[in-house]
Image: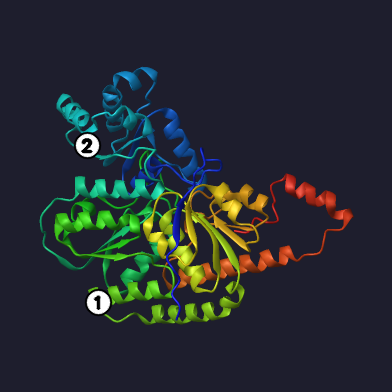
Amino acid sequence: MTLSPPATLVRSRKALTVSPLKTSAPLGAAMAFMGIDGCLPLFHGAQGCTAFSLVMMVRHFREAIPLQTTAMNEVTTILGGLENIEQALLNITKRTHPKVIGLITTGLTETRGEDMVGDLKTIRQRNPVLDDTVVVLTSTPDFSGGLETGWGKAVSAMIATLVPAGPQPRDAERVTVLAGCHLTPGDIEELRDIIEAFGLRPTILPDLSGSLDGHLPETWVPTTLGGTPLEEIQTLGRAARTIAIGEHMRISGALLEERTGVPTAFLDRVTGLEAVDTLMSLLAEISGRPVPMRLRRQRSQLIDALMDSHFSFGGTRLALAGEPDLVWTLGTLVSGLGARLQAVVTSVDAPFLAGLDTEEVVVGDLEDLAERAGGCDLMIANANARLPAERAGVALFRAGFPILDRLGVAHRVALGYRGTRDTVFALGNALIEAAQTAHAPTAHPANTNRAEEGADHGRSPLALG
């Protein structure tokens, strides 16, 4: 067997980002706080910082997103934002009574170098009414890291603030899952079902399946509509084991183990036959129970799906872009099916991506992806890649965040045997459709006008997923 050499990690040397791929770290942190029950994320920055993130999440999840701002302006940016934070905390506590406030810094306030810890201490001393208000401070400058970075920092801040240090009485049937932001609410719901099938009780942090799964509340709620309860976060030290999913959850898992002594198992992904087998073995070890029959049947279905699909993937050339853990998950999946990763672009430095079966991984934008995607059979990226994909003449399969022009993206499942099977079929069908489109006869002149009308309404023949 011949082993492929490690991929070369390359940083784009352009003077500016032309077609952005990276999403800001504060947005990732805000999304993580959306997975906490009764929470209200608060951006410490200008109104524009909050509005941009709010629009992105509303259009992706198509749900109401509770997000507040300290509304920094020209004067407070120079003199300091302590009064803005104080007023925001008092107003939010008085009007919405959240269980948790996630205070998130932005590039504006981080560049100024505000002493956020000191400011919070001063605010609490001046306002005893805030004694019962839980505030989780997360440092997420826009200029450092991306979506997964901000998510990971927020989860670490939750653990550092809310989980008491020291051992607690263990519950042999309880498991903590630190879920990465590349998992959809549908993925988390599937993961919960799998863990419960082993007789275990999972606490998933953060849990977007409870807050952004599209359910309708009976009354209007000004905070998040579900997610991980505060009480469960405070008792994570009672779990028998912690499972951290995704490289950006590694630091959070290590911190939780350091504070509670609960051993952490790290899984780089939970999509793909080998990866899901590892998850099943781990759950069987923790629970002391065999893998349930229905999951064994799903494994058999996945193997059949892989055999059915590999003819569609073998020898194809793919272009892939996204946040590092998403790229790792999908890249290993399609490489295992025989596809060649011709172009791989990610948003931030991620040395572990050198393990992908490709020649180079570029830290860049969607323009870098389009420049390298010529001749590819399919491009896999978020919805912002629609125009770059059209310019490159490559069909686009939408994956990651944001996906603004498709419905039901929060319910997609790529996790477990069943989710892997469905993802393989979706990608395989996209390849088949792209090949059929590429070899379709030239349109008759009489149909040209109608085709142009369809294009005018945003119906691209290359838009697949």
Give the labeled residue for mark 2.
133
| Callouts 2 and 1 close, C-beta under 8 Å | no
* Three-letter code, disc 1: Glu
**Quadrant the C terminus occupies:** bottom right
Residue 152, placed above or below residue 435:
above
Q: How many marks?
A: 2
Q: Quadrant of residue 292?
A: bottom left
For disc 1, the marked residue is 285
**In this image, 276 relative to 316: left or right?**
left
**Residue 378 position within the rendered picture, expressed as x and y whole percent measured from the top left:** 61, 62
Residue drawn at (23%, 52%) of the image: 233
At label 2, the amino acid type is: Thr
| Residue 185 seen in this snapshot | no
Q: Is residue 211 above or below residue 75?
A: below
Q: In this view of the protein, can residue 107 be seen by the observer?
A: yes
When the figure is inspected, residue 140 is found, relative to residue 300, above or below; the finding is: above
Other residues around mark 1 within 10 Å, as few (<14) / some (14–19) / many (≥20): few
Secondary structure beneath dot 2 equals loop
| Viewer-nearest residue: 465 or 342 | 342
Circle 1: element type: helix
